[in-house]
Amino acid sequence: MKKLVVLTGAGMSAESGIRTFRDSNGLWEEYDVMEVASIEGWHKNPELMLRFYNERRKQMFSCQPNKGHLLLAALEKEFEVCIITQNIDNLHEQAGSTKVVHLHGELSKARSSADPTLIYAIGNRDILMGEKCAKGSQLRPFIVWFGEEVPAMAEAVPLVESADILCIIGTSLNVYPAAGLLHYAPNGCPVFLIDPNPPKDLPRRIQVIAKGAGEGVEELANKLIILI
Ligand code: NAD
């Protein structure tokens, strides 16, 4: 089977009702991004951060995977599909995708604020102020914030390097190091990008499908038939 590597961003979940950054003028659900998505924000106001991610978690559990998520999961019949997502929702998993790397963490997990390797599955429940990890430090969302390392890049880079086909869906390619992943695609590897409003100045090798995730993945699947 050929390896289809898919890099997804916030636009992948837009048709499930979760807003992207770009559609909100750089705000994340009305909040200043640096207030709710940076390590400085956590040190300044952990209560606000916990409240914000508790809301995002509730929202995620009220949403369903969309047609794009479902079609990507169905492509596992013909391809070895590896998804690398910047999203912190679990809609790819809900749709049935079996290999998903989360670059920026997951809402359904909590971690120790002192030890990044102490991670707990919490499902759909809030993280409360005063709730401690086994080592006695405050629990925090298992999210990679601006100003923090992205450990999952170590897993993502070899996946892209070994891709037979790469597809990028619903990301403005503004957030690094995730945006740099496309440059690891091997020479000759076809690269597709699905986005109704594609980023400007893309490398010429990228074949753009200027559609939303649902219709776009349908078109991609039709194009891929000849590559099976
Ligand atoms: P972004 O908001 O910067 O860009 C979103 C992209 O999606 C844009 O290019 C937009 O044109 C495109 N888009 C909009 N509607 C679409 C649709 N229906 N189908 C396909 N594409 C569509 O998002 P980003 O590049 O992922 O960077 C934002 C960061 O914010 C990421 O790190 C991510 O972790 C985080 N974030 C995550 C979620 C989530 O988990 N669902 C939601 C918002 C933000």
Image (cartoon, helix red, strand yellow):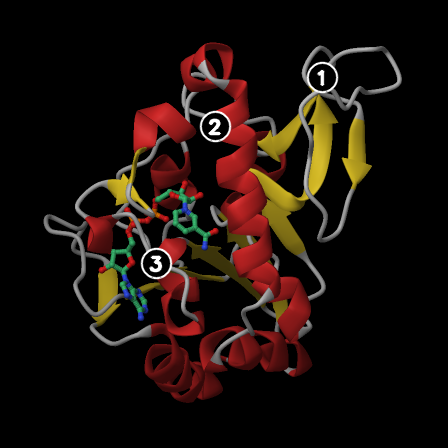
Under mark 1, the amino acid is: Gln
Q: Earlier in the sequence, mark 1 or mark 2?
A: 2
Foreground label between 2 and 3: 2
| Residue bearing mark 1 | 138
Foreground label between 1 and 3: 1
Q: Is mark 3 within 8 Å of ligand 1?
A: yes
Under mark 3, the amino acid is: Arg
Label 3 Cα neighbours within 10 Å, binned few <14 / some 14-19 / many ≥20: some
Vertical order, 66 against 146 (above or below): below
Under mark 2, the amino acid is: Leu
Foreground label between 1 and 2: 2
| Residue bearing mark 3 | 19
Badge 2 vs badge 3, beta-carbon distance below 8 Å: no
Give the percent coordinates (x, y) of residue 134: 89, 18
Front residue (pair 60, 171): 60
Number of numbered callouts drawn:
3
Q: Quadrant of residue 12?
A: bottom left
